[in-house]
Amino acid sequence: MPLVRLADYRPAPFLLERTDLVVQLHADHSEVAAQLAFRPNPAAEPGPLLLQGVDLELLELAIDGRKLEPGAYQLGAGELLIAEPPTGSFLLESRVRLHPHSNTTLEGLYVSGGLFTTQCEAEGFRRITFHPDRPDLLSRFRVRIEADRASCPVLLSNGNCVETGELPADPVSGAARHFASWDDPFPKPSYLFALVAGQLEEVTDTFTTASGRPVALRIHVEPGDGPYTAHAMASLKRAMAWDGQRYGLEYDLDEFNIVAVRHFNMGAMENKSLNIFNSKLVLADAETATDGELERIESVIGHEYFHNWTGNRITCRDWFQLSLKEGLTVFRDQCFTEDLHGAALNRIENVALLRNTQFREDAGPTAHPVQPDAYQAIDNFYTTTIYEKGSELIRMLHTLLGEETFMRGMALYVSRHDGTAATCEDFVQAMEDGAAQGWAADPLAPRFDFSQFRRWYHQAGTPRLHIQRHWDGDTGVLELLVQQHTPATPGQSDKQPLVIPLALGLLDQAGEPLAVQLEGDPAAATPKGAGTRLLVIDQAEQSLRLVGLPRQHHPPALSLLRQFSAPVLLEMGRPTAELVHLLAADRDPFARWDAGQVLLRQAVLARAGGGGDGLLEEELIDAFGRILADPSLSEASRSVLLALPGMAELEAACSAAGQEPDPPALFAALLALQGRFGTALAEPLAAALERCMPQWGLAWPEGNGDRLLTGTVWSWLVAAGGESGGAAARAAVAAVGGPSMTLARAGLRALQCQPIPERQQALDAFYQRWQHRPVILDAWFGLEASAPFADGLERVARLLEHPRFDPAAPNSVRAVLGGLAANAPVFHAADGSGYSFMAERIAELDQRNPITASRLAKIFSRWQSYGPARAAAMRGALEQLAAASLSTNTAEVVGQCLGAS
Ligand code: B3K
Ligand code: ZN
């Protein structure tokens, strides 16, 4: 499969004014008649007309009413080329037949549980009709849907419904038929097209925008699911209000629809005015979803809604610009959540995710820049680099420019590019122009070079920030030698220095913040926050002198990368005592948490290496004891400070320390450490539980922290065993039958790795209770698949044959195979059986759903970081996969992984 390259981008020779569709849905096939109104593109060279079409049977093709003879066009694999189209404007008409019922890719038009639905981003529209299907061609869509009235009473598409009516009965079945016509006044790229037809229950509400436009809000779900939509609806209204208040961006149509579908490749899709959601991100209340899931639903509903401006009205010129809409919209949804629920803990949650997913991607064979320059399958680029690192880039601009100047840049971006397809460069240029205005007004604002900042978009890999310090107690001067270095990534060996915002603070021995003054800097010391100073790092190596500090023998404690001011890896060995001090006293919540994470990583690695660091564990136990009793902390903050690092981070920490990660050993070390903490802290943990229990019944977001900490307490006590462990295990079993899904799942997690009878009782009870609710049962599949016991693979094989397992539902597949991948002792078994089992399953899955298969294949990407035996077994599994007949998507990932040897 050839590479698509950014360098080959050319504007289309023809612009598209209108896309008019008549879609006839039938029980065994569908037909689509399309009228495409083209006109020459004044900004492009004249050329042939290239249309895309996949798995379509062409029935008719005409230009300006004249049928095209077979010699007038070439129909190749996935393409239809008209070499000599008319030189002026023309109307192209086509009619195709397709088979949504047998479309298992979940792209284009397909059927999920009897419901016709679509997914067109990135290139699914070409599975519906012949079309240029490129994001820089925006056209006005009119769509008429025709279907059986009984099986498809609800007919939806983008824009406004302008007409409905009866049709003659089906001549074969005699079934009554009807139609609905939709008109979307906003020109849009084909990837934002959507159509839904089926039996749906509708829940309605309204929202009035700041300028007084009433918007009808509708959530469509399977009949019977209406009662579970209240949280999604409330989230949507909060998102609409937030975008209006914070960005001044209002909704632009009279209706906004959300549809929940069970079979969906990802979370949700921002189609203009017709968002389609994975049903697990719509159906939720306290009894059926955890606090974390409720928060995620709110953020994804916000994310898709925010795309209406950042993605739909301003879309992407080509798919290399994907982060233009995704990075920016993730940044916006993160700010939405921070504004609603507090910035500190959300930032920590997002950083933990970034480190465990994006940093791993950046360190492996699939590493790519936020703006890639070549791809084989665009679906493979919906990555955590495009989304999460892309968002970090926007956040750094926000940090460097400040809210006011950032918003100036945003306003310029929106006013310049509304209604067009733009590039990442357009966004950065708007920010640069906004900065010029902001900097003219504020001579003390930190300056940086935008050209250098742009390197973040083109350079892959996580930069390392190496810091050494020298303290001169006689003069009160702290000198920092800062070096930055980005390791080589595939295809990019030379890296240039980046602009890195480094927020730091200093603490005295009492934990009080010290004023931070940079030598030679006219700006006042520590202008904002709890003594936080923002420094701009832009050289490969530079020295910074912090002056005016108290003259004393003991250096101040250094709190670094506050709020995680840049997506970099910090390389600085700070002594345990300094980290313990920061964990106890740092006022920046991120830096405080991060100090604990450094210590915890060290403690886990020491245990995984055999011995364990008893002294360090004692320090942590003391620190955690104080945190559990610290009256200034919320229960949520306590729980976050006590959270153990993720496996991906631990593996990376091993590699950074020059060791080969041994996942089963790391996993065992994590469990053992929980047990140690549970034993040593039994009393304060029991006291915390007493404190939290009265809040268990509060409705989210209230009570969230209490339930979170309860989960930590149960996990640690159960891991410790003994009398309090037994009591915690019984409480965990009881929670499965209780009113809170958060507590039920916390209980299951606490029992998950323990071969005790309570574990089976709890899982059985959960299954019995939720076996008829597939969205909820996926959690059970995930837990069973990740049970770290010797019979792991047989268990997973049984799950894949389970009567309630739906192989067509990516959620269930991910629950089971993702659960296996997270099951360190089973997946990483020394004999390689986990790897080859997984490779077989991925090859099977690839036959039906390449998008889901290629995503899963990335679990093999870090094979080279393991010891020789594991690396060889993993490589063997990759070769086993490569030998199968693979989709372009999966072949690209496997090729990248193997090519990295
Ligand atoms: N834009 C979609 C993702 C589409 C994925 C296509 N394979 C959802 C989102 O990011 O909002
Ligand atoms: Zn998005």
Image (cartoon, grey):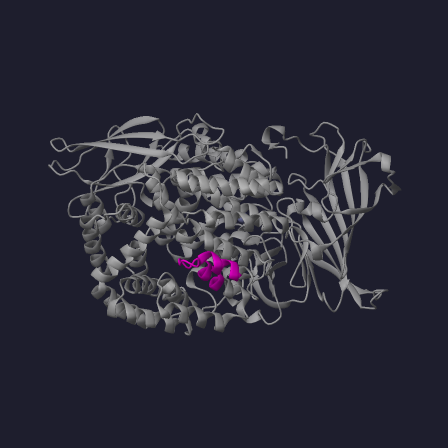
Q: What residue is at 21 percent from the left and 55 percent from the top?
A: 621
Task: Please tell me whether the stretch drawn in magenta is mainly helix, strand or loop.
Answer: helix
Indicate the quadrant where residue 625 lies: bottom left
Report the quarter where the N terminus lies: top right
The reply, left or right, for residue 546 in relation to residue 484 is: left
Task: Estimate the x, y position of residue 147 in percent, counting from the top left.
Answer: 76, 62
Nearer to the camera, 597 or 245: 597
Taking the view exactly as shown, the residue that stands out farthest to the front is 831
Q: Is residue 846 visible?
A: yes
Which residue: 22% across, 50% down? 585
Determine whether 317 is above or below 806 in the image.
Answer: above
Count the marks: 0
Q: Is residue 103 magenta?
A: no
Q: Residue at x 11, y 36 (%)?
A: 553
- Image height of 638 relative to 331, above or below: below
616 relative position to 895: left or right: left
Residue 384 appears anywhere in the view: no
Question: Magenta region: which residues?
Answer: 779-799
Q: Who is closer to the viewer here, 483 or 513?
A: 483
- Residue 305 in picture, x, y percent from top left: 55, 53
Q: Position of residue 199 (x, y in %)?
A: 67, 67
The percent position of residue 647, horizontal first and vertical second, equals 37, 49
Q: Any magenta on residue 791?
A: yes
